[in-house]
Image (spheres, helix red, strand yellow):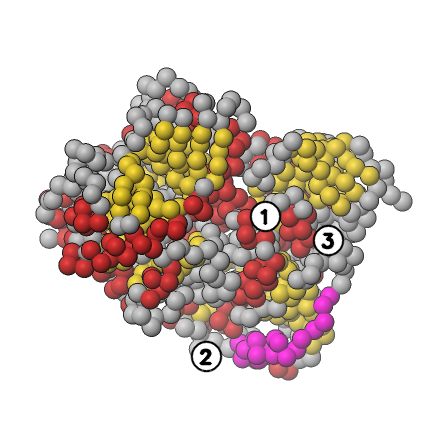
């Protein structure tokens, strides 16, 4: 009998899979009682019921790892908390490596996991076979062992969340499909169901494969697509113990777990099979898809090689069921950019069970307080670009996304499918020059320039191969001559109106009340003092400001601005990104090059640092910013799109004898790391304050206008931060650093690198990471410590500093020529000599 639909609920959860049920459970744990979960059919009927139920905790970032660790811990006690059995067993997990590259990836992952507080051991082949006797380890070079991993029964675990939610006061209604999300005046007001409407204060969509369509009806991009997922279950295997560790052979594209005396073996094949291009049927519930033995046969053969016993046992089940994948294999969590009170938790890429506890906790806290408890930017739905709900794009990308879960995670690697969606007007010129492209927010961006016949979508390796040599040449040219960086992917957001100044002052820690033509770099804070973004703002008229931000922050920053513009009086915010290309001219000879193609006076007196002018250049016009992200003299040219090609050609023709060359984003990254420039999303985030990040110079304490987060900064002012972003150099380290490497002080772990690369000018690895000390992270504390950086399990001596190792006084930015030995940090020179 159907329980009566209430007319109102404080929280409405759309979808009764394990994610929605976990959110309901966690909302009640926070004390919320007016919680309503609506399921279109029966609980778990979409994807949860056929999930494999592996529970692993190693993730690519600290906060994702913490979510997974929380989930594993919760699963251990969920039965006791709710009285509902879950089937959770902490049997451990083993991931084997049969190639040197995979073993290095596992070693790097183990180091990263330990920096996140997860015990990961690298074991040899003999130890792997001792733990899983059925393994063939003839070609195994090593393996990763995580004792705290395990497995659970997905349906029983979901029922435990449901039981706990009901015990906490939540109402769960099955067979109540939500047909529409109701929105009025930019705010969610409820949901419409087949049985009537429910008014709601907040709504979260947890509808799995159906989420994209529900969101698209609101003009909201939540990009995910279903794919067929295959596994087989054997007949009973004598001697297969219930506590047999779960197994992964990533190169064989397979995983395995004990399942009631049988073996479940699943696959993440390199070429997946997208499903549901025309939409997912609303009545699709406890159903499977047609099996396809031909599709999985090569991977099943590989599994038999790794587990020879499979060849001697029959298959009881050959299963195929759909799961949803996102374009970048990361979750979709958080608020709708332009609809207050509406949230999503979806797109779990076959990791929904092992992520359910953490995701439910995150979303319950986010909905309850209005902001996330930590930095979840890599999972934030606001990273999605509007075009990414295009079904053909999602279909084609999903075919690759399935296999990318187990593919080697090379540095600077991008997917190869569904490319060339957003291209600069210079794209074909750069391709002809040998550009290797990566993807960011759908943009094709040059990583480095190699031979003209190099793969367009190549990637780096862990070693000093061709990519390393190519980016080194670009790095060195920027330091010694002049280079061109195509940064057309920048987002441009125009603020206009008589209240424009007070609006940007309210958002900015720095003082933006500057003369027309001045540029200000400033963080934007949330109410807890964390950096929601960092942007460059040019005052282009009395009541007009141009905000320039990173490509991936476009949707997020635009939503942040529009949210606060509602209460800002007479002000408008317009996304004008598609009107601009950006070409950065960087290096000590940049002024000389620009003077050859423009009549503008580029001298310090006429065109000082942090100013903007509209200039004639070539046959066109550009808004030139004297700014730099590489630590050298340089200008960003913001050019009308239709004029960009002509400007580029003019610069190239005029600079041949100056050594002008193109450069890519890998060199941009290594240059900025040497100079100590922060990268939002890596070095700074919405849980880092400017004072912790070493950006105190961006805070205008004396400006008359108040700004968001000021009271929190005032409470930190004058104190030595207990947590501080620190620069690192590893002069003797041969292995390359890419970020997430643990940092040790006097033999104890104290943090990890947020970002890292090779400083070709400094001649060693460089990076940045947050360290913590109860008495404060001071220069004296750093000086008294012996630091090491752990790379792939080996520790290497490192130098720690609160200041950049390259040109800390910014003399090169000012156009002053200094010898390298005069601008490299003395402590680094001493070690190197």
Q: State which region is magenta.
A: 288-306
Q: Residues within 10 Å of mark 3 (few under 14, many from 20)?
A: many
Q: Position of residue 517 (x, y in %)?
A: 30, 31
- Give the residue pinned by disc 3: 44
- Give the residue pinned by disc 2: 138
Q: Nearer the viewer, residue 210 or 736?
A: 210
Res. 351 in view: no
* Distance from Cα at disc 3 to Cα at disc 1: 25 Å
Q: Residue at x 68, y 68 (%)?
A: 320
Q: Is residue 299 above or below residue 446?
A: below
Question: Dot 1 lies on which element?
Answer: loop
In this view, the residue farthest toward the front is 619
Q: Which mark is residue 221?
A: 1
Q: Is residue 192 above or below residue 503?
A: below
Q: Quadrant of residue 538?
A: top left
Instruction: Look at the image and say whether residue 302 sits in the magenta stretch.
Output: yes
Judge from the rendering whether residue 29 lies leftward or rightward of residue 142; answer left or right: right
Judge from the rendering whether residue 482 lies leftward or rightward of residue 694; answer left or right: left
Question: Dot 2 lies on which element?
Answer: loop
Disc nearest the viewer among 2 and 1: 1
Q: Position of residue 618 (x, y in %)?
A: 26, 50
Q: Position of residue 794 (x, y in %)?
A: 31, 58
Q: Quadrant of residue 610?
A: top left
Instruction: Look at the image and say whether residue 45 sits in the magenta stretch.
Output: no
Q: Nearer the viewer, residue 135 or 566?
A: 566
Mark 2 touches mark 1? (CB < 8 Å): no
Sequence-earlier tag: 3 or 1: 3
The N terminus sits in image quarter: top right
Res. 36 in view: yes
């Amino acid at each position: 009998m159907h329980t009566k639909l209430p007319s109102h609920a404080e929280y409405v959860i759309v979808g009764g899979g394990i994610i929605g049920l976990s959110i309901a459970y966690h909302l009640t744990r926070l004390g919320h009682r007016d919680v309503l979960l609506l399921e279109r059919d029966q609980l778990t009927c979409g994807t949860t019921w056929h999930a494999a139920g592996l529970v692993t905790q190693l993730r690519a970032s600290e906060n994702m790892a913490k979510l997974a660790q929380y989930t594993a811990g919760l699963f251990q006690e969920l039965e006791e908390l709710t009285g509902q059995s879950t089937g959770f067993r902490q049997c451990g997990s083993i991931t084997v490596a049969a190639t040197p590259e995979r073993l290095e990836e596992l070693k790097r992952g183990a180091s990263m996991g330990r920096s996140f507080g997860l015990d990961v051991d690298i074991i040899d082949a003999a130890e792997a076979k001792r733990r899983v006797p059925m393994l063939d380890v003839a070609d195994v070079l090593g393996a990763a062992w995580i004792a705290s991993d395990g497995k659970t029964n997905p349906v029983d675990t979901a029922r435990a969340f449901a039981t706990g939610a009901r015990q906490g006061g939540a109402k769960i209604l099955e067979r109540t499909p939500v047909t529409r999300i109701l929105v009025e005046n930019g705010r969610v007001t409820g949901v419409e169901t087949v049985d009537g409407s429910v008014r709601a204060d907040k709504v979260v969509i947890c509808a799995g494969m159906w989420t994209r369509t529900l969101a698209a009806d609101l003009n909201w991009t939540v990009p995910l697509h279903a794919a067929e997922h295959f596994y087989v279950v054997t007949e009973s295997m004598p001697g297969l113990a219930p506590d047999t560790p779960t197994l992964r052979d990533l190169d064989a594209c397979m995983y395995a777990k004990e399942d009631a005396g049988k073996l479940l073996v699943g696959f993440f094949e390199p070429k997946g099979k997208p499903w549901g291009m025309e939409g997912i049927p609303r009545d699709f519930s406890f159903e499977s898809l047609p099996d396809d033995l031909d599709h999985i046969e090569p991977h099943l053969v590989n599994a038999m090689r790794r587990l020879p016993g499979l060849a001697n046992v029959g298959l009881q089940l050959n299963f195929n069921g759909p799961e949803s994948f996102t374009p970048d294999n990361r979750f979709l969590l958080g608020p709708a950019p332009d609809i207050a009170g509406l949230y999503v938790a979806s797109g779990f890429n076959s990791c929904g069970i092992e992520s359910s506890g953490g995701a439910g906790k995150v979303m319950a806290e986010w909905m309850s307080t209005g902001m996330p408890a930590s930095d979840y930017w890599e999972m934030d739905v606001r990273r999605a670009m509007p075009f990414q709900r295009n079904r053909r794009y999602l279909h084609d990308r999903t075919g690759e996304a399935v296999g990318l879960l187990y593919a080697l995670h090379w540095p600077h690697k991008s997917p190869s499918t569904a490319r060339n969606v957003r291209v600069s007007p210079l794209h074909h010129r750069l391709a002809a020059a040998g550009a290797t492209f990566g993807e960011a927010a759908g943009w094709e961006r040059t990583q480095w320039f190699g031979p003209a016949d190099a793969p367009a979508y190549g990637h780096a390796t862990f070693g000093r191969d061709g990519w390393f040599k190519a980016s080194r040449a670009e790095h060195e040219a920027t330091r010694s001559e002049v280079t061109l960086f195509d940064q057309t992917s920048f987002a441009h957001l125009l603020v206009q109106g008589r209240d424009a100044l007070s609006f940007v002052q309210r958002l900015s820690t720095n003082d933006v009340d500057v003369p027309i033509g001045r540029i200000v770099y400033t963080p934007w804070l949330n109410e807890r003092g964390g950096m929601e973004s960092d942007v460059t703002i040019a005052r282009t008229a009395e009541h007009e400001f141009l905000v320039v931000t990173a490509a991936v922050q476009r949707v997020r920053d635009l939503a942040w601005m529009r949210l606060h513009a509602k209460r800002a009086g007479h002000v408008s915010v317009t996304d004008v990104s598609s009107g601009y290309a950006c070409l950065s001219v960087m290096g000590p000879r940049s002024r000389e090059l620009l003077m050859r193609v423009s009549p503008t006076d580029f001298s310090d007196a006429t065109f000082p640092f942090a100013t903007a002018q509209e200039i004639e250049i070539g046959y066109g016009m550009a808004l030139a910013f004297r700014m730099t992200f590489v630590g050298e003299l340089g200008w960003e040219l913001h050019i009308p799109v239709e004029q960009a090609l002509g400007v580029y050609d003019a610069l190239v023709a005029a600079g041949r004898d100056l050594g002008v060359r193109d450069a890519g984003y890998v060199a941009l990254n290594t240059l900025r790391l040497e100079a100590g420039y922060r990268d939002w999303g890596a070095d700074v985030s919405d849980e880092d304050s400017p004072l912790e990040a070493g950006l105190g110079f961006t805070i205008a304490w004396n400006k008359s206008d108040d700004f968001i987060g000021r009271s929190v900064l005032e409470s930190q002012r004058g104190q030595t931060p207990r947590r501080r972003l620190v620069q690192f150099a590893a002069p003797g380290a041969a292995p390359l650093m890419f970020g997430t490497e643990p940092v040790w002080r006097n033999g104890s772990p104290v943090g990890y690198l947020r970002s890292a690369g090779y400083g070709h000018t400094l001649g060693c690895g460089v990076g940045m990471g947050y360290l913590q000390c109860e008495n404060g992270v001071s220069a004296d504390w750093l000086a008294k410590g012996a630091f090491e950086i752990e790379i792939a399990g080996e520790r290497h001596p490192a130098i720690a500093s609160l200041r950049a190792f390259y040109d800390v006084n910014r003399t090169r930015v000012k156009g002053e020529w200094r010898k390298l030995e005069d601008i490299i940090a003395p402590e680094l020179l001493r070690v190197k000599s």
